[in-house]
Amino acid sequence: MFVRVWTEYVPSPDPFSLVFMLKNRILVGACWKGKLEGDESNVYGFFEHLLTACYYFLQPEHPHVKALTRFERMNAEEAGFRLKGDEVVVYRGVERNSIYYACSTGRIARIYYHNELLEFTNCPEYGGKHKGVVELPLREFVEDVLEISREYLEKYAPIIEKIRLEHGEEPDDYDFLQKFYREVEMLYRESGFC
C-alpha cells in the first residue's frame, strides 16, 4: 500500500492532492509523462474511509455492518461493479475522480475500483488499468492502513492543518481521527489476526 499526499495548497474545495496505490494499481490519482500525479482529495476523509473500512472488516457480524453491506452491495451492482458472493463486508469510498469498494471475505481484502482520472493516462504501464480488482490478505490490508494512518497523523496532519488554517479554513477534528485510529488498532489486536 502506498499513499502520497502533496502539501501544496490549491484553492478549491479539496486543496490537497493524493495518490493511493495497492499492488502497483493506482486507485486514486494518475500518471502523466512518467510521473505520479495526485488527485484533489479530502485527505482527512480519505484516511477516515480507510479506517472505517478496517473498523467494519474487524466486526463483520455487527448488525450495522450487515445492513450497510447489503445496501452497498446493491449500490456497487447498480454502478456496474461485479462483486463476488463471498464478501461479508462491503464498504464504499469515494474521492473526486475515483470510487472503490473495500470488501472483506473474512480472510481476504478485495478492493474493486474505478479511477476515471487514470483512463486518460499516457503512461503505458498503467494503460487500461483504470478499473479492476486488487486482492490481498485482510491482515496485511489492516496492518498497512494502520501504518499509513499513524504516519499521516504523526507527521503530515500537523503540516496540512497548519496550511489549511493559514488559508482561513476550519480545522478538521483530528482528536476524533486519533481516537478512531486507536479504536481500530484495539479491534485489530483483539481480533486474533496479530
Image (cartoon, rainbow, N blue to C red):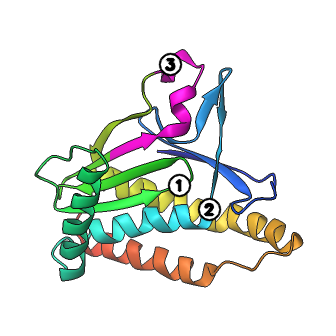
Image quarter of the C terminus:
bottom left
Residue 80 included in the magenta stretch of the image: no
Q: What amino acid is labelled 3 in the image?
A: Glu
Please state the extent of the stretch shown in magenta in the rendering. 112-127
Q: Could you tell me if residue 172 is visible in this image? A: yes
Write the residue at 73% across / 79% down.
171
Crowd band around label 3 with a 10 angstrom C-alpha radius: few (<14), some (14–19), many (20+): few
Q: Where is residue 103 in the image (x, y as percent from the top left)?
A: 27, 55
Taking 105 as reference, is 147 left or right? Answer: right
Q: Which circle marks residue 42 in the picture?
A: 2
Q: Is residue 72 placed above or below 33 in the rendered structure?
A: below
Q: Which of marks 1 and 2 is nearer the N terminus?
A: 2
Write the residue at 50% across / 68% down.
48
Count how many numbered circles sit on residues in the image.
3
Alpha carbons under labels 3 and 2: distance apart:
27 Å
Alpha carbons under labels 3 and 1: distance apart:
23 Å
Q: Do the residues labelled 1 and 2 touch (CB within 8 Å)?
A: yes
- Under circle 1, the secondary element is loop
Comparing marks 3 and 1, which lies closer to the viewer?
1
Write the residue at 28% across / 44% down.
80
Q: Where is residue 92 in the image (x, y as percent from the top left)?
A: 36, 60
Write the residue at 33% across / 47% down.
111
Crowd band around label 1 with a 10 angstrom C-alpha radius: few (<14), some (14–19), many (20+): many
Q: What amino acid is labelled 1 in the image?
A: Glu
Residue with the mark numbered 1: 95
Residue with the mark numbered 3: 125
Q: Earlier in the sequence, mark 3 or mark 2?
A: 2
Taking 169 as reference, is 141 left or right? Answer: left
